[in-house]
Image (spheres, helix red, strand yellow):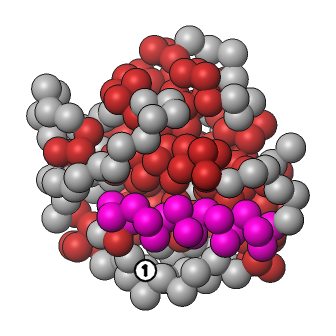
Amino acid sequence: MKKFIVPVLSVFFFMSCTADETLSESDNLEMPNRDHIKLKSLDIAKNPANNLDYIGILHAEILEGYIQDYSSSTELIYVINGVEAVAFNDTNFYSILNNYQGLNANETEWVIDNTIKPQEIINITYMSQRGKDQMSSFISMLDSFENEQYSMVYNTITAFEKKVDTDSSLTGIDKQTILATTSTARYSIAFENRGGGRGWNKTKVGIIASINSDVAEAVTTSVAANIMAE
């Protein structure tokens, strides 16, 4: 898997919003309108305290855009092309690009195949060992979320995010990678709970596939994996 690093300082320049601000204000970007699921219904997922909250928003935007604009396919290269077409039509996506070269089908297939062995994906990130251990801890929680009320899922994830954000032993890349994944989890689980029609396995696969030290690649890989999962 390609592992391009988004400079930590540039990522954390995104300012979080106050509790009464809209999702678009949290990253100072204008969100495109989508009529199918009404992204405003995902306000329930927002966590202004997570500076990577916009990653989960992008996941939901691009996934919904693909569902709305493309037919389902079992061909990975078709899915990748569709996901990236939607992504590059989203002005929000351009804000996180840093030498993004596009998804490689073989590398993306490797990630999808290894979502059943998430430690393999975690191990190839640029996180420190402490960061990898924390990511493993979060991924181990996922199965407990399947039949849980969303309010409980949300509270569990945001409590974990607070712990990560205040952990001085974690590096900037650790926090960037973990908080992008937890944001993806909050929004993708909310997406499914609000009638996204993905099913738990697709949702879980997409979350695990978002483990990537490059946030742009995390978004597109997670969406492609969600679509390809059975």
Q: Is residue 183 visible?
A: no
Q: On the picture, is 97 further left or further right than 21?
A: right
Q: Crowding near pointer 1: few (<14 within 10 Å), some, many (20+)?
A: some
Q: Amino acid at mark 1?
A: Ile
Identify the residue shown where x is 34% and y is 50%.
Answer: 32
Q: Is residue 141 visible?
A: yes
Image quadrant occupied by the N terminus: bottom right
* Residue 201 drawn above or below residue 82: above
Identify the residue shown where x is 26% and y is 39%.
Answer: 23
Q: Which residues fall within the magenta stretch?
A: 76-93
The image shows a total of numbered marks equal to 1
Q: Look at the image and say whether residue 91 sits in the magenta stretch.
A: yes
Dominant secondary structure of the residues highlighted in magenta in the image: helix
Q: On the picture, is 197 further left or further right than 128?
A: right
* Residue 8 drawn above or below residue 183: below
Q: Secondary structure at mark 1?
A: loop
Give x and y (percent) for residue 173.
39, 69
Residue in front for this viewpoint, 132 or 29 = 29
